[in-house]
Amino acid sequence: MFLCTVYKGFPVYKMSPNMMKTPLPLLTEELVENVQVSKETKTVKKSWKNLWCYFGDEDLKWKNIMVLTSIHLFFLYSVYHILIVKKLYYMLFFFYIPYGYVGAFGVTAGAHRYYTHKCYKVKLPLKIFLVMAHASAGMNSMFHWVRDHRIHHKFTDTEADPHNASRGFFFSHVGWLMVKKNAAVIREGRKVDMRDVLEDPVVQFQEKHFGLLSLMLCHVIPILIPWYFWNYELWDCFCMNMIKWVYLINGVWAVNSAAHIWGTKPYDKNILPTENKWVSFIAIGEGWHNYHHTFPWDYKAAELSWWLNVTGVFLNIFAALGWVYDLKTPSQELIERVVKSRGDGSRLVWGKEVPETEEKQSID
Ligand SMILES: [Zn+2]
Ligand SMILES: [Zn+2]
């Protein structure tokens, strides 16, 4: 299911009977108010043992294990070859990194904030750009990405969560792609309402041609452009593209792993997701994850739209241009009530921690 797997037929999903039954569990402000904090969560102990993973008794996906291991070994070689031997900083930083950002926007603004959570509405040209950008990231197709992420939010860090962080860093980061999904994940995956995604013609196009699109946009085109136009060696382009790709996918995976283990919990201390500025830096604004799991419909995926939140800035710019509209965000009053009743007292405002007394004064 990972990488450039050739899609085996869009109608398969249309035939699946269970997907149409349960309405999408989109949280509203009222629902957040009423959420009981008694939800069972397992605490991840900060021990070295947790840096590995609990694989359970799921069957291993040997093809994925081999591909994932190979690309990471090749990434290490590529860093050495490009940065130390060839010193091709210019092309890496002025072509491949920006190209990687395009793919990242497809994941964060497109797959995550638009398709999974419906945080805003978008005009067709930008929607097409986001869906194609998502294909260029070299991850799962839009349909699989959104379905997995909706289950993740509904069953966060429990057995039915595809990348359950209760099973340790490695499992939630990449290990979950190395094993077959367990029965709970499959069962709940079939119940997720995906009608809005299935009916979207741009997603239908991506799904139908995903193997080819992903191969061309993630690998072939970015490798050939510097080779053809600027006479770089093909092998060097291949290595620089590998750095771009492996860095990008690890940045996104860090949201599922590091931002569920390390960091503060100013909005809900009873869940595993955390506020992690390093993940926000790497994953262009997706590391404010305690906030995001508390207010998943907020287009900012963070309290602040600009602080270590490149995707928030991206959406603000397109909102100013009128290409995105109807952006959802909770009221300041609701945020402050939730912080006060459920937070661990570590809220950040303007990038700095708010002392308890100062916060209380601002609420009163
Ligand atoms: Zn999460
Ligand atoms: Zn989310």
Image (cartoon, rainbow, N blue to C red):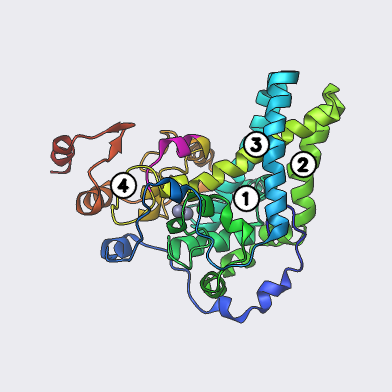
Q: Which mark is residue 100?
A: 3
Three-letter code for the amino acid on which mark 1 is drawn = Lys
- Where's residue 332, x and y in %? 28, 46
Q: Mark 1 falls on what kind of element? A: helix
Q: Quadrant of the N terminus?
A: bottom right
Tell me what residue is drawn at x 59 percent, y 47 percent: 107
Q: Dot 4: within a 10 Å radius of its alpha carbon, few (fewer than 14), some, or many (20 or more) residues?
A: many
In front of the other: label 4 or label 3? 4
In front of the other: label 1 or label 4? 4
Three-letter code for the amino acid on which mark 2 is drawn = His
Q: Mark 3 falls on what kind of element? A: helix
Q: Dot 3: within a 10 Å radius of its alpha carbon, few (fewer than 14), some, or many (20 or more) residues?
A: many
Work out whether 73 lies above or below 197.
above
Q: Residue furthest front?
A: 49
In the image: residue 361, left or right of residue 66:
left
Closer-to-camera residue (305/251): 251
Q: Which mark is residue 219?
A: 2
Q: CA distance from mark 4 to mark 2?
A: 38 Å
N-terminal label among 1 and 4? 1
Instruction: Look at the image and say whether residue 275 sits in the magenta stretch.
Output: yes
Q: Mark 4 falls on what kind of element? A: loop
> What residue range appears in magenta?
274-281
N-terminal label among 1 and 3? 3
Residue on which the image places disc 4: 265
